[in-house]
Image: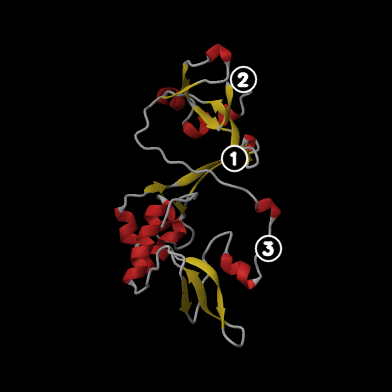
Amino acid sequence: PRQKPCGEFLSPECVPYLEELGVADAVRDLAPWWVQGMAMHAAGHRALGRFRRVGARGAHALAGMGIRREVFDHVLLRGAQAAGAQWLPRHEFVELVRAPDGRVAGAKLRTGNGEPFEVRAKWVVGADGVNSGVARDMGVRKPIPWLDRFALAAHFEGVAPELHAKAQSDPSVYSRELKVSGAVLGDTIVYDPADNLKLTFVMVQVPGDLDEIEREGGLAEALHQAVNDPTRARITVVY
């Protein structure tokens, strides 16, 4: 388990699976953030929805869970080990092992020290993500241009109610400490790996005061108004 970009959300229908795996109580003990619905914003439109029971579904159908990916993965790991699985940390997939008739019979791995390691198995599950080495070895991995994207994720702990930054490019505010309260405009994000991995995006001003956010109808409404108001202050960030 490691930190990685992730939506870090489990839909309500994941709860029965956690129960079946025997890890539901361990997940609840971590005090996840219970999510009762979502507000979605795109292309100038917005929609607010709440989870609800459908048919005879139980109480689990009313809320999903927000939980850190690396924390949740540790719970799954402990559950798998309790069920008898053997964990091989820091092992990298190299290629599949084939039986004489062409069937997949295991996998060749590389240890953290670079040593080869072979595992024989009746079943091989390639749960190794979008850049799956297993899919590549089987010849079923194909490029999908519109999925050639990257994701950004961040966590903040102990953040002060007001964030500040120092301007370095605008002479009128050079070296002054500025209060920052804004939202990143998703369609302005530009990543240039050829230019020293430069990342550029635009932030639009949103209220920095909780009372003002409440007056605008809550955080979702405040963000919606900000991104659709051309008079709001905007700054370009180059990282």
Indicate which label's residue lies in the foreground, 2 or 3.
3
User: Can you say which quadrant of the picture contains the C terminus?
Assistant: top right
Indicate which label's residue lies in the foreground, 1 or 2.
1
Q: CA distance from mark 3 to mark 1?
A: 26 Å
Which residue extends farthest bottom?
A: 101
Q: Is residue 237 above or below residue 39?
A: above
Side of 48 relative to 212 (left or right): right
Residue 142 disc label: 3
Tag 2, which secondary structure? loop
Residue at 46 percent across and 41 percent down: it is: 154
Q: Position of residue 9 (x, y in %)?
A: 46, 51
Q: Amino acid at mark 2?
A: Thr
Tag 3, which secondary structure? loop
Residue designated by label 2:
231
Q: CA distance from mark 2 to mark 3?
A: 44 Å
Q: Is residue 59 visible?
A: no
Residue at 42 percent across and 54 percent down: it is: 2
Q: Is residue 50 above or below residue 72?
A: above
Report the front residue among 56 and 192. 192
Q: Is residue 173 visible?
A: yes
Q: Is residue 193 above or below residue 142?
A: above
Residue designated by label 1:
197
